[in-house]
Image (cartoon, rainbow, N blue to C red):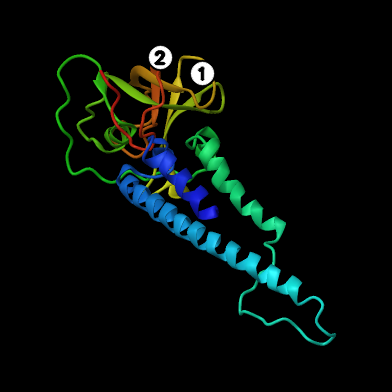
């Protein structure tokens, strides 16, 4: 029963939906599907074997009753099987599988980000030339790198578009956040950019913001603030792959 429940839960979040992307990277989805099928197959094999054991147990009980009138000291023959009942507390093992099957937990959000270790952005060898006009959609990773590494100061005075979810901040500000994972949600790290100029939406709300770099520190150096003066804000649905840091759509 546990194998069947667990396998069905894994297939529900990986084969029949994309809920598994709340917990693992896209590349692991095929492996989850294969694991779900394997568990279901083992569960079916176990169920067929259990039905045979039940028939065997009934025959054992009938033989035991037929020998109940035997003289004292004569024990019924032992057939080598343990027919003890499963302890009731063992059924608690089914609870996690039932929760995943019926109430899939959401993706990580602001609670995790506020307690997570910050993501260190790798050093960029070079930066592509930005479009000459119009707002520039950037991932939080590229925005962070351009602010603190681009000696050409390409973001100076440029309007950019970022997306992420809301994390409460301090002193009247709030953070636009992305959680990045190497494998699964257990190894998540956060990227945050502080927002200025507009009130904070509710925590965990996914938004797309348009604005300019908030001048603090020297742009193009490690002292540059990862912050944005927001001009406009738009609520958006959570992306299908919440742990993939992509530029927002135009």
Q: Residue 178, percent across and down? A: 41, 34
Residue pointed to by mark 1: 201
Q: Residue 27, percent across and down? A: 30, 46
Q: Is mark 1 on a helix, strand or loop?
A: loop
Residue pointed to by mark 2: 233
Number of other residues with Cα within 10 Å of mark 1, as a class: few under 14, some 14 to 19, many 20 or more: some
Q: How many marks?
A: 2
* Outermost residue, bottom side: 73
Classify residue 221 as left or right of residue 175: left
Classify residue 31 as left or right of residue 108: left
Number of other residues with Cα within 10 Å of mark 2, as a class: few under 14, some 14 to 19, many 20 or more: some
Residue at 70% from the left image edge and 61% from the top image edge:
87
Whether residue 138 appears in this view of the structure is yes
Q: Evaluate if marks 1 and 2 touch, with contact meaning CB atoms under 8 Å apart.
A: yes
Residue 144 found in image quarter: top left
72 vs 34: above or below: below
Q: Residue 111, percent across and down? A: 55, 36
**Labels 1 and 2: the sequence-earlier one:** 1
Residues 206 and 106: in front is 106
């Amino acid at each position: 029963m546990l194998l069947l429940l667990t396998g069905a839960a894994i297939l529900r979040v990986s084969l029949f939906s994309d809920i598994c992307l709340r917990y693992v990277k896209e590349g692991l989805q095929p492996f989850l599907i294969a694991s779900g099928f394997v568990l279901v197959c083992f569960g079916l094999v176990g169920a067929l074997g259990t039905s045979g054991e039940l028939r065997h147990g009934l025959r054992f009980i009938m033989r035991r009753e037929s020998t109940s009138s035997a003289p004292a000291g004569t024990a019924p023959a032992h057939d080598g099987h343990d027919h003890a009942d499963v302890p009731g507390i063992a059924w608690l093992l089914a609870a996690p599988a039932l929760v995943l099957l019926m109430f899939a937990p959401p993706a990580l959000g602001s609670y995790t980000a506020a307690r997570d270790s910050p993501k260190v952005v790798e050093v960029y060898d070079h930066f592509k030339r930005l479009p000459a006009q119009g707002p520039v959609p950037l991932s939080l990773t590229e925005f962070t790198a351009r602010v603190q590494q681009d000696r050409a100061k390409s973001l100076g005075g440029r309007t950019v578009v970022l997306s992420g979810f809301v994390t409460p901040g301090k002193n009247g500000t709030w953070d636009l956040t992305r959680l990045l994972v190497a494998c699964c949600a257990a190894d998540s790290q956060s990227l945050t950019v502080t927002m200025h100029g507009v009130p904070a939406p509710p925590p965990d709300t996914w938004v797309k913001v348009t604005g300019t770099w908030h001048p603090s520190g020297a742009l193009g150096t490690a002292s540059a603030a990862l912050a944005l003066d927001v001009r406009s804000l738009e609520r958006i649905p959570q992306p299908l792959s919440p742990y993939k840091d992509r530029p927002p759509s135009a």
